[in-house]
C-alpha cells in the first residue's frame, strides 16, 4: 500500500492551483482583448453599425428636408440596388470614386420608374451616417440634391479591403 505524504500532496495541489490560476488569468486577458476589439463594431461606437447606415442616412436627410419645409423622401428598392452596386464598384476599384456610370443608372430609373429627374450624391471615407450627411449639406451641389424636388431615394454603401466606406445616394421624382 502506498502511503500519501501530506507535505507532498500539499505541494502538488499548490502546483495545480498555480497552473489553473495562470491559465485563468491568460483566458481573462484574451477575453478582455476580444471585447476591446469587438467594441469598435458595436452600435454605440461612432454609429459604425453598418446594418443601420442606410436608414440613418435617410433619417438625417429627411430631418433636413422637413426643417426646410420639404416632404420626406421614400426609400426605393431599385434605386437602393443601383446605389449599392455603384458603391461596391467604387470599393473594389472597378470604377473610380465619383459619378462614373451615372447616366446609365439615371436611364434605368427613368425607364423603370418613369422618373423625370434623377440626382446622385457620393462620399468616401470611414464616416458615420451623420458625418456623411453633414458633409453633403456643406457642399452646394450635394445640398441641392438633398433639398431638391425629389420624392424617392436609394442608398447604398460598400467597404473596401482597406476599410474605407463608399456611399451613394440616388434621388428621383
Image (cartoon, rainbow, N blue to C red):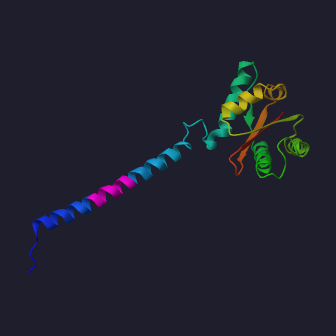
Q: Nearer the viewer, residue 6 or 111?
A: 6
Magenta residue span: 18-26
Quarter of the view holding residue 45: top right
- The correct choice, above or below, for 158 with respect to 123 in the image is below
Q: Is residue 114 left or right of residue 65?
A: right
Q: Nearer the viewer, residue 60 or 8?
A: 8
Image coordinates for residue 58, horizontal then vertical, percent:
70, 33
- The correct choice, above or below, for 12 with respect to 171 in the image is below
Q: Determine the main secondary structure of the stretch shown in magenta.
A: helix
The reply to whether the magenta stretch includes residue 30 is no
Quarter of the view holding residue 11: bottom left
Q: Nearer the viewer, residue 118 or 156?
A: 156
Q: Is residue 12 left or right of residue 105?
A: left
Farthest bottom residue in view: 1
Image coordinates for residue 142, horizontal then vertical, percent:
81, 29
- The correct choice, above or below, for 6 with respect to 123 in the image is below
Image coordinates for residue 23, horizontal then vertical, percent:
35, 58
Q: Is residue 61 visible?
A: no
Q: Residue at x 71, y 22 (%)?
A: 66
Q: Is residue 22 left or right of residue 101?
A: left
Q: Residue at x 10, y 66 (%)?
A: 6
Q: Is residue 112 visible?
A: yes
The reply to whether the magenta stretch includes residue 21 is yes
The N terminus - image quarter: bottom left
The C terminus - image quarter: top right
Amino acid at each position: 500500500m502506498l502511503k500519501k505524504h501530506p507535505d507532498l500532496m500539499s505541494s502538488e495541489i499548490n502546483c495545480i492551483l498555480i497552473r489553473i490560476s495562470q491559465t485563468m488569468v491568460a483566458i481573462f486577458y484574451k477575453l478582455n482583448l476580444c471585447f476591446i476589439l469587438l467594441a469598435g463594431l458595436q452600435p454605440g461606437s461612432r454609429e459604425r453599425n453598418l446594418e443601420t447606415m442606410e436608414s440613418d442616412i435617410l433619417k438625417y436627410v429627411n430631418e433636413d428636408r422637413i426643417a426646410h419645409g420639404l416632404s420626406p423622401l421614400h426609400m426605393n428598392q431599385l434605386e437602393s440596388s443601383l446605389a449599392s452596386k455603384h458603391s461596391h464598384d467604387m470599393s473594389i476599384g472597378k470604377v473610380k470614386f465619383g459619378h462614373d456610370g451615372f447616366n446609365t443608372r439615371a436611364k434605368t430609373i427613368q425607364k423603370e420608374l418613369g422618373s423625370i429627374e434623377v440626382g446622385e450624391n457620393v462620399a468616401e471615407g470611414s464616416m458615420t451616417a451623420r458625418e456623411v450627411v453633414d458633409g453633403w449639406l456643406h457642399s452646394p451641389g450635394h445640398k441641392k440634391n438633398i433639398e431638391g424636388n425629389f420624392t424617392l431615394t436609394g442608398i447604398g454603401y460598400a467597404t473596401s479591403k482597406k476599410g474605407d466606406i463608399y456611399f451613394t445616394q440616388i434621388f428621383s421624382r
